[in-house]
Image (cartoon, grey):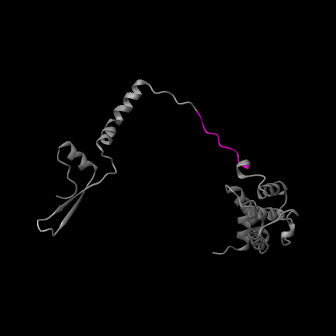
Amino acid sequence: MRLTDEQRKQYYADLGIDRDDLLSEVDITLGELPPDVQLDERQTVMVLGIVREWNRLDALSKIDAAQSMERRVLTRRSADSAEAWGAYLLLGRLRDSEARRAVMQKIARRESSLAQTRPKRQRDRTASVPRTAQQRRDGATFLAPTHARLRDGVTGSRRETTRDQGTANETINIRDRGLSEALWDRSGGAPPRRGRS
């Protein structure tokens, strides 16, 4: 489904994108990078691709693309310097984006990393409360059956297989025994029946 012009304008208005935020629709060139920036071949191809795509867009889409490229650089743990230079160029066409553009330049020059721009999360480091004697006894009682199974070599992931051969070696019956059957066999009782008789 293609949006009409009115639907597109409403969509961008809902995102807070205003046509007046675009300073100029003049095509961007690599000459707008700072004079001391030297891009290698891969970076040049990448930045040129970003710029060519942006130059073809309409005014509202250009604003959206510039903000999207900025978010892309900021949300990556290690941003590619070519993407950061692309965002730097795109933000140059938006109103009041000098500070945001400076951040993109720092990231592109590797003077700043995402770890420096994001606040660090503080973990709650509350001291653990020592357990009482009753809590230790309850824990030991609860874990006793598990420790007994581990001592006997029976775990929940173990599967035992027995092979029965007929008198003339015609057939081989393979039967998987799960944990409950293995436990019953070791205790000397009869295993519980599963399925049909």
First to last magenta residue range: 117-125
Residue extending furthest front? 168
For the point 33% across and 38% down, which residue is it? 147
Which is nearer the eye, 82 or 53? 82
Residue 179 location (% of width, % of height):
28, 49
Q: Is residue 17 above or below residue 54?
A: above
Residue 131 location (% of width, % of height):
46, 27
Residue 76 quadrant: bottom right
> Could you tell me which quadrant the C terminus lies in?
bottom left
Residue extending furthest left? 167
For the point 11% across and 65% down, which residue is it? 167
For the point 34% across and 51% down, which residue is it? 157
Residue extending furthest right? 35
> Could you tell me which quadrant the N terminus lies in?
bottom right
Q: What kind of secondary structure does the magenta stretch mostly adopt?
A: loop
Residue 50 location (% of width, % of height):
75, 70
For the point 15% across and 70% down, which residue is it? 170
* Horizontal side of residue 140 vs 174, given as left or right: right
